Amino acid sequence: MTTQPFSLYVHIPFCTAKCTYCDFNSYAGQDSLMTPYAEAAAREAALWSPHLAGRQVETVFFGGGTPSLLPLAEMRVIVEAMRANFDTPTDVEFSLEANPGTVDAAHLQGLRSLGFNRISFGVQSFHEEELRRLERIHDAQEVEDAYRWAREAGFANVNLDLIYGLAGQTMEAWQTNLETALALGSDHLSLYALTLEEGTPLTRDVDRGRSAGPDLDLQADMFEWTRDRMTAAGFAHYEVSNWARPGRECRHNLVYWHNGDWLGLGAGAHSHLFDNRFAAAASPSRYIALVQEASSNPPLRGPSAEGPWQPLTPRSSPSPRIAAEVLPAHPEALEGPAPAPNPDHSSSIFDSFRQVTFREPADRLREMSETVILALRLREGLDLAGFEARFGARVADAFAAPLRETLDLGLTELVDGRLRLRDEAVLLGDEAFLRFLPDYDPA
Ligand code: SF4
């Protein structure tokens, strides 16, 4: 039995309103489910607990949705269940995402007293007009208040999320946004180029000609300016969209990018554990009902007893930003028949977990592919010796053609035993990533 540590992700799917560009697994108008949802997440922790005995929690991340919307009493139910059921050292990175318009000083102090030590504010912009266009519920003053209250509450590790390249946004407007964020003095900045995600209101408006899409050339210019400015400000660019002051890299997200093990609790939360990728039902009410059923059912009733599992889109979470931006698509989970229940040994672990509605047993080639692609998102790149130790195969053998091709195209480079994206190719990462997919077809 492995003693390898794992990370814990808890999905809180509630939001005050649905933002126009958002394709995360989040819901407005379901606040009445918060109490049963917290109880279900706590119960789910207890269900997984026996299978994770002897393994320490490495990092904890509450994502959403808007975790800061959950009242402290409900948050306490989940946190106490987490500590009761998993070996969670008190000094692990313990993060939550927060919307600046949903917190006050007392709430932030309450979160600190529950043990949260890192907070990530979804700021997106400091311009009122841009915030309105994104249908965000906060204003710039609320960001500054929330930031100050977080520091006063004792959060020593604060991240701000910003989006650049909105339609109509000028370079000057973006520069003002970033300068305002830098002036606040956060430890970490996640800076995302606006992308059009399938099924969002924004994408529909762009498709119908009602809104302009992002200007990709201007986005590239903004990225180049940002990289220089962030470096000058003392931040390390450690992942395509992420900058940190020394030692403030997000450890939880590094577990994803190193393709490590994590357990996701909550509706739509994805997990990478027990040699499987799996996900819970996305709908909060269905999740609550299925956890209830799992808690009262003996392990004999597996998913196979009621036909094939329903595949969920893997884009619905874990930390939704990670799912949407980092994990390569799993085409076989999106098209064609659902994967058959797995006859392997690990399937017995899942027998009683009714809330798990998507599962894909690990496939060595896919694991290797994902390990390469995720590591390429990091500026440090892929540790070639570490890859060989993990998989018993050299990248040069397992991915001879894509390796040669991405090197020849100037997308990647080999530096000090690592394969990484070249500085000039960071924005062309997708061109490199897709070549390492197992089913890549150059035609
Ligand atoms: S972007 Fe964030 S706050 Fe807006 S709907 Fe999505 S999860 Fe909720």
Image (spheres, rainbow, N blue to C red):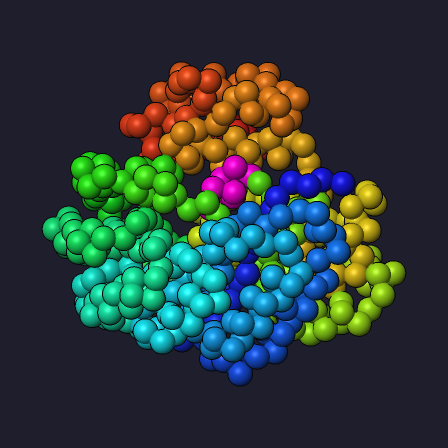
Question: Which quarter of the picture shows residue 137?
Answer: bottom left
**Residue 253 can be seen in this image:** yes
Q: Residue at x 49, y 20 (%)?
A: 403
Total count of labels: 0
* Residue drawn at 63 percent across, 74 percent down: 39
Relative to 229, is 387 on the left or the right? right
Viewer-proximal residue among 79 and 347? 79
Please name the residue shown 66% across and 22% down the image. Answer: 392
Q: Looking at this rendering, what residue extends furthest in the right direction?
A: 300
The quarter of the displayed image where residue 287 is located: bottom right
Q: Is residue 326 left or right of residue 438?
A: left
Residue 259 sits in which quadrant?
A: top right
The percent coordinates of residue 334 (x first, y second) are 61, 50
- The location of residue 216, given as percent across then percent down, is 27, 44
Q: Position of residue 170 (x, y in %)?
A: 15, 52
**Frontmost residue, 393 versus 165:** 393
Work out whether residue 287 can be spotted: no
| Residue 413 drawn at (x, y percent) | 39, 20
Q: Which residues are magenta?
A: 253-259
Q: Against 132, is 161 above or below?
A: above
Quadrant where the N terminus sits is: top right
Predominant SS along the magenta part: helix
Q: Is residue 67 magenta?
A: no
Q: Is residue 174 above or below residue 4?
A: below
Q: Residue at x 55, y 33 (%)?
A: 371
Q: Residue furthest left?
A: 172
Image side of residue 255 versus residue 236, left or right: right
**Viewer-proximal residue, 198 or 108?**
108
